[in-house]
Image: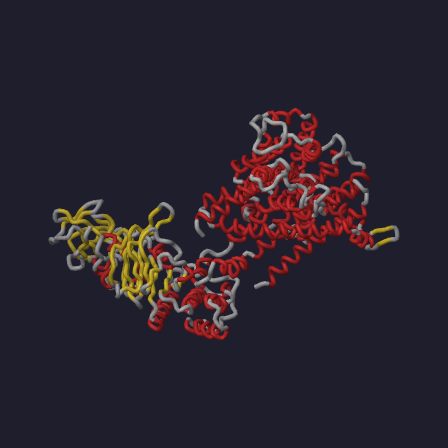
Amino acid sequence: MSRLTIWVVLGLTLTFLIGPFIIIIFAGASAGESLAFPPHGLSLRWYLKVFTIESFRASFLLSLFLAIFGTISALLIGIPAAYALNRYKLPGDETIRMIVSAPIIVPGIIVGLALLRYLVVPLDFTVTLALFLAHTALVLPYAVRVVSSSLQNLRADMEEAAVLLGCTRLQAFTKIVLPNIRGGVLAAFILGFVTSFNQVPVSLFLSGPGVKTLPIDMLAYMEMTYDPSVAALSALLAFMSLAIVFTAERLLGFSRYV
Amino acid sequence: MFLSTKEGLALALPAAIFSFLLFLVPVGILLSEAFKSDVGWTISGYTEFFSKPLNRTVFFRTLKLGVLVAGTSAIIGYAAAFCIVNLPPKSRGRIFGLVILPLMISPVARTYAWIVILGRTGIVNDTIVGLGLSDTPIRLLFTETAVFLGLLQLFMPLMIISLVSAMENIPRDVIPAARVLGASWFQVFFRVILPLTKEGLVIGGTLVFTGALTAYITPAILGGSKVLMLETLLYQKVNVSNDFVSASVIAMILIVMSFSANLLLKRIATARV
Amino acid sequence: MSEAFVSLSNLTLSYGSTVAVPNLDLDIREGELIALLGPSGCGKTTTMRAIAGLLTPTTGNIVIDGRDVTRLAANKRGIGLVFQSYALFPHLSAFENVAFGLRLQKLEDHDIRARTDAGMATVGLSGFEARKPAEMSGGQQQRLALARSLVMQPKVLLLDEPLSNLDARLRLEMRTELQRVQKDTGVTMVFVTHDQSEALALADRIVLMKDGEIVQLGTPAQLYSEPATAFAADFMGFENIFRVEAGRLVSDIGSLPMGYSTESKMLAWRPGGVVVGDGPHKARVLASSFAGGHREYVLESQLGPIKADAPIESAEVALGDPVVFDLPQATARPLAP
């Protein structure tokens, strides 16, 4: 395969995959009034405008809250589950795995609708609580999967060695297992955070007036506004996700765990 | 060691129960709605649904686009994956990272870019009008093509990841061996690469097809109400017409389609030797 | 050149910006079994891959049986290559592996069957047709890879480290096998190896390479007894190589007087050429091991460590004990530096 062919094929593919971002970044930096590319002059004013929109601030904070705490709670029940599935021979472990992974398979809209109709309304949950529970459930499969793969790379006889040297099971877990899966946990956290933050379909149904996640807020804004601020907002969101992932990669070679 | 099943279950069950209660139960009930009517269990919901031409159009369009996106991403995916696998190790990691990058970014942002590209005053139209190929801007948004492109961009990285992983498992030297035995590149692909990367193709194909089937944002933004897909139709049924039976029917159809696609692909993969 | 069946001229081979083989000229005769021998990185595998068409030369020509194949694609050269990893197709049965190349040529089915059966019989694998490569032992896999190349009736058969992955007994069997095949089919064989004993046992001629260049080209006997340079001597098993300066043997550690004179600037001894127990030089036994027919010593002398073999009948000298030794002129091999 000649070098040239390789670079041409990859060049075209990457242009298709990433080109649109570059476009959005510059479209958002337009000095003009309307959305266009190439932009009519360069200016950061639309990027700045994004920060002034009141509802975005509120929804950003909500999204942030859900992403952080939803992922933490997913990890709190997910890590023990991953550990149990990995180290024990459990009856019905295939079933448990399937149940925990289910949210990934079922379309988001269905999940959102179902939760709304059969959980939130009958039990009268607040929107925030509903969103919190939903996001936890959505992140759980990723948490279990990533931590599982991290655990598989950690040999079981290390814990046995620790116990033989005098540790209790819990000590073996905290001293041996946790430090060694730290990378996997961090990776799961990042993945969960990004998934939750970008989540749309479920949040679409569960959001109520005044309580919206950022992507939902953006969608509504997009339907009414046609100026470059939408592009600027999209670009900012993209940057944020990228920044998080890059730092993660730098800190711990993230890609090993996914 | 670690033989205590009770302990293990105690650790794993909270996650399972949480998922079950919060997720499987509500979804299960929702899906069962598709079979209910005033007089008990029936499939009249389905027959009603398919009796309307609009619904049939939406159904077939969704299926068509799903297959097209999966097929196109497989073709381009194989080309890209083959290239990536043949790169020197340093570049390989970086290029692979670039391919995965889009996955980390919100679908809203990713889709919105297409508006800039395909809109009336977007790049494509500017070029077309500028080159004199047409007097007025062509309508590119809110067409099936727009949705197709949006979905392709969204899900192709998944196919590429799957195929790269499968290709890395091809034993070294097998491809040069086939070449030395006289195979043209065409023959190398169909007789060696394809059979050896079947599983990757199945996984990638399932991910892309299911993704395309169940995407909401992209069809919503790029297709609007002119190019309805099953998911956007579902949303309409719920929020606009309050028609929950139809919504459940659609939900059930989507799930059945996903499972069937998975089964079909697996069957094809194991059958062909 | 009328004599050469495979002719490499002015060949330069590079990987990206690194030049692996700067300017190679080599003629291979029809029907001969020739070995490319050398340490890792000497360019032997690179040269082999170039002959196969898996690497395009930067400059130079490759001519096979009168035809210039330098720019010809790998799948059109009519060459067989048995990879070190065997590269068998995991998804195909043994029969289909061997038949692979024949099927590509769209031959008649009965023709393919006949040739494949014959091919498998030649390497002693009749009856294995339905097995998958994963279900076969290492030795069987290699024979399968050999059959796969042989049924194509190649003009040249290339083998990459054919004996390296095998245990001692299999190695002997495979060696015999390869020689028999070569005698029966008369195919020109080029094999690549880093093991000098393999090259000595199998080859009609040996090409000793280092850093992409040919150090010495000759018969096994020539390379064994008359290595041309210090590198060749070292590679072919002369483990004691010293410079000659002002009537003394000199190494980086020290020197010893010589009892004779020589014109050569460098002398080398095989371990078997060193005399243990009788001689003018003093040493101490640093290591001693039993090797069946002889005992292998490492002696610590003024020249540094000396590897010496003593016949099994001679008295054993214990570890740490003093001993005398000699580096006689009779067994010395003079070298160009």
Quarter of the image holding residue A210? top right
Give coordinates of residue C58: x percent, y percent.
34, 51
Q: Residue at x 32, y 51 (%)?
A: C59
Specify whether B251 is left or right of B125: right
Residue under the point 64% across and 25% down: A49
Quadrant showing the N terminus of chain C = bottom left
User: C35 and A32: which one is in front?
Assistant: A32
For residue B250, side relative to residue A94 (left or right): right
Residue for point 21% across, 56% down: C228
Residue B208 visible in the shown view: yes
Which residue sits at x=64%, y=53%?
B67
Front-most of residues B256 and C64: C64
Rendered image quadrant of residue C26: bottom left
Quarter assignment of residue C51: bottom left
The answer to whether B216 is drawn above or below residue B253 in the figure is above
Q: Nearer the viewer, residue C2 or B125?
A: B125
Q: How many marks?
A: 0
Looking at the picture, the colour scheme in use is secondary structure
User: In this picture, is A191 found above or below B186?
Assistant: above
Horizontal and vertical percent position of residue C181: 36, 70
Q: Quick one: A164 or B20, which is closer to the camera?
A: B20
- Which residue is farthest right? B39
Residue B196 rendering spot, x and y as whole percentages: 53, 58
Can you give x and y, in whole percent of width and height, for residue B95 in the image? 50, 43
Q: Is residue A194 something that shows in the picture?
A: no
